[in-house]
Amino acid sequence: MVKYHAPKRGSLAFRRKRAKRIYPHVSTWPDVDQVRLLGYPAYKVGMISVYEKNVLVSERAMWYGLERVVAATVLEAPPIRIIGMRFYGVDGYGLKTIDEIWCPHFGKFERKYLQRKFPLPKKSVEEAKKILEEKAAKIRELIDNDEIREIRAIVRTCPELTTIGKKKPEVLEIKVSGEIKEAYEWCNEHLGKFIRVRDVFEPGMFIDVIGVTKGKGFQGVVKRFGVKLLPPKSKKGYRRLGSLGPWTPGRIMWTVPRPGQLGYFRRTEYNKQILTL
């Protein structure tokens, strides 16, 4: 009799559904005392092989002190512009938005792609600056009363400076670390200015990377779950399941591999070291 072999396929921890958008929403940020941005968006260019020695390993590793070839990912990280700030408080359900401040000046290029989706100031620069000063006084009062618990910078990417052939920027929130007063002063000082990747990360740092995998579309069970092929003389095809399950229960169980979406999944990888900038 043939030995029964049916390893568990898939995981409930990683849903096989399309990501809502190409850039992620980060729900948990690290605790850092230094005042700076805690993240930075970048575009993947490709992968290369690099020679390294004592970069990615500890002294206990068997190849410590030896040169070896490792795979590395190349990212294109153009400057980002801080176009606003968003302030969060805490209620019985968690974080809630208290108020937000937008940069008083936007160019034609930014308004072309952003004004339909975001509440950009429509008045003149002078009037927008007056509104900004009034909101700043209100925000300082809330900070003194300890009502603001988190500050995030609203940034926009600059894909027009890359080689990917894209113009429409992404707009996302990045938390600013440090004390609330210091974080607010830092955001207020850099509002409307450009931030470079060297202002956020340094070579040798270990970071977590969030991205979206390459989309494969609607695929079958062999490519999606690695199911073994049926014998060549099987009826109705051999790149399929031999059985969908028992007679009872009268339904297909969730553990049975099924065809569906493959790729374009949001995934997080931990402890990636920055080799160079």
Image: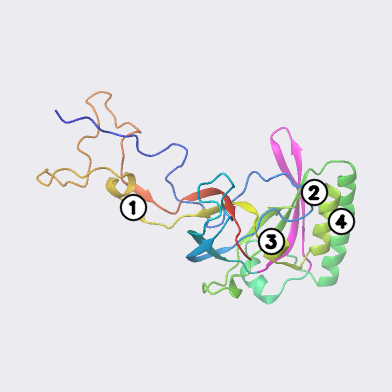
Where does the image place residue 45, in percent across and percent down from the top left? Answer: 51, 67
Instruction: Please report whichever mark, 3 or 2, sits nearer to the chain's N-terminal start.
Output: 3
Q: Is residue 88 left or right of residue 159?
A: right
Q: Nearer the viewer, mark 4 or mark 3?
A: 3
The number of callouts visible is 4
Real-space Cα separation, disc 2 to disc 4, in angstroms: 19 Å
- Quick one: label 1 or label 2, which is nearer the N terminus? 2
Q: Nearer the viewer, mark 1 or mark 2?
A: 2
Left or right of residue 269: residue 217 = left
Of the 4 image quadrants, the one containing the N terminus is: top left
Q: Residue at label 2?
A: 178
Disc 2 packing (10 Å; few <14; some 14–19; many ≥20): some
The residue singled out by tag 1 in the image is: 218
N-terminal label among 1 and 3: 3
Q: Residue furthest left?
A: 233
Give the numbered dot on residue 136: 4
Q: Which residue is mark 3?
A: 155
Q: Specify the segment rendered in magenta.
A: 79-104
Q: Is residue 93 magenta?
A: yes
Q: Rounded to the nearest whole Å, what is the CA distance between mark 1 and mark 3?
A: 34 Å
Q: Which three-letter amino acid code belongs to the residue tagged 2?
A: Gly
